[in-house]
Image: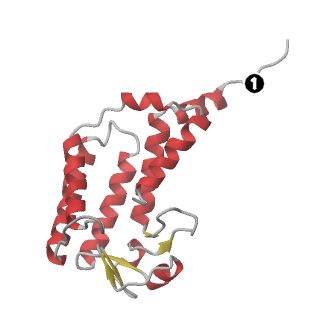
Amino acid sequence: MALALPLLAGLAVAPLLGGRWSLLGRVRLRALGFFYVGLALQVAAFPAGHLPWRTPDGVAVGLWLASYVVLAVALAVNLRSVPGVPLVGAGLVLNVVAVVANGGHMPALPAALQAAGMHFTQSRNSVALAHPHLAWLVDRWAAPGWVPYGNVFSVGDVLIAAGSVLFALVATGALTSVRGARARPPRTAG
């Protein structure tokens, strides 16, 4: 949920910058089914508290990594045609590298967990580690308290968030509107 917030923020800001939500209908995602399958695999791996099952840890890790493979295929197919996808793809790759280097879970630095008001040894796909491998790629920062569903986040998450905002702004025409406004010479009286 937390990674959907940058997309929603980009969509909320877009009209203020001259973007139009109606332009979203022009976006043509290819391999859309792959996105759905990737998300379904993640839900199966880590069901929310109100879903009627619990997935054993080893199976959950396998499903989670499989979801990344499926999502990577979907992103690769859309790499050149959908704005923001290269950033989302780079973030996904960095997160996978951190997960694989640390045994199948995304490490979270204890200081980041404390700053986020979270206390756990392992929670779903995260594990608290003071000295993880590739520490610069792990969940190392805490979202501010005012962020809904705030959590800890990584460099990969930052790239995914930036790609989501970029997608929203380009797809709605907001960035084109801003660039066009700067490119136009000021009106003169006369």
Q: Residue at x 23, y 79 (%)?
A: 103
Q: Residue at x 25, y 54 (%)?
A: 39
Q: How many marks?
A: 1
SS label for mark 1: loop
Q: Residue furthest top?
A: 190
Name the outermost residue toward the right.
Answer: 190
Check disc 1: other Cα within 10 Å, few if <14, some if 14-19, many if 20+: few
Residue at the spot 20% in from the left edge and 72% down from the top edge: 54
Tell me the residue at 21%/55% (across/down): 40
Along the viewing direction, whichever of 81 and 153 lies nearer the viewer:
153
Q: How is the image coloured?
A: secondary structure
Vertical relation: 11 (above or below) 154:
above
Q: In which quadrant is the N terminus drawn? A: bottom left
Residue 105 higher or lower than 69, as above or below: below
Q: Position of residue 152 (x, y in %)?
A: 45, 72
Left or right? Give the position of 84 relative to 99: right
Mark 1 sits on what residue?
186
Is 153 drawn above or below residue 12 in the view shown? below
Q: Quadrant of the C terminus?
A: top right
Res 98 quadrant in image = bottom left
Figure check: 76 above or below 139: above
Residue 108, image x, y percentages: 39, 78
Q: Position of residue 92 (x, y in %)?
A: 32, 59
Q: Amino acid at mark 1?
A: Pro
Q: Nearer the viewer, residue 108 or 136?
A: 108
Choose between 149 and 34: the one closer to the eye. Answer: 149
